[in-house]
Image: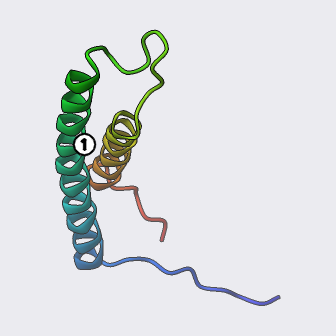
Amino acid sequence: MRRTTRFRATFTEDRLFRTAAALTGATLTASAVLAADLARMHMASIGTVCGAGPHPHCGWCLGAASLVLAGLAAFRLAFAPLRARAA
């Protein structure tokens, strides 16, 4: 029978990974705020809310929503509780 070893991250590697995930989440959230601002300006220029009536959702609306979701996923990864390691 062949034994295989699984990679186990050390505490510093885990902390570095979580810090990078938190910074990615902050960047994605900041980008979502900018996209939402552009979407609001676009809605003001057409005089209605995107998705209402004959106007479909603009790319800024969809981009802002997807960036918020990606930012939340990155924050979830960064602040998830540590798993117990098997010996």
Rendered residue at 28%/55% (across/down): 78
Q: Position of residue 61 (x, y in %)?
A: 35, 33
Q: In the current view of this chain or complex, which residue is farthest to the front?
A: 46
Q: Position of residue 53 (x, y in %)?
A: 46, 9
Along the line of sight, the residue nearer the viewer: 72 or 46: 46
Rendered residue at 30%/47% (across/down): 71
Q: Amino acid at mark 1?
A: Ala
Q: Which residue is mark 1?
A: 35
Quarter where residue 1 is shown: bottom right
Left or right, 5 with reference to 13: right
Q: How is the structure coloured here?
A: rainbow
The vertical placement of 7 against 71, above or below, is below
Helix, strand or loop at mark 1: helix
Left or right, 85 with reference to 28: right
Along the line of sight, the residue nearer the viewer: 12 or 41: 41
Q: In the current view of this chain or complex, which residue is farthest to the bottom?
A: 2
Rendered residue at 33%/39% (across/down): 60
Q: Position of residue 30 (x, y in %)?
A: 16, 49
Rendered residue at 49%/14% (across/down): 54
The vertical placement of 47 against 82, above or below, is above
Q: Position of residue 63 (x, y in %)?
A: 37, 43
Along the line of sight, the residue nearer the viewer: 1 or 31: 31
Quarter where residue 5 is shown: bottom right
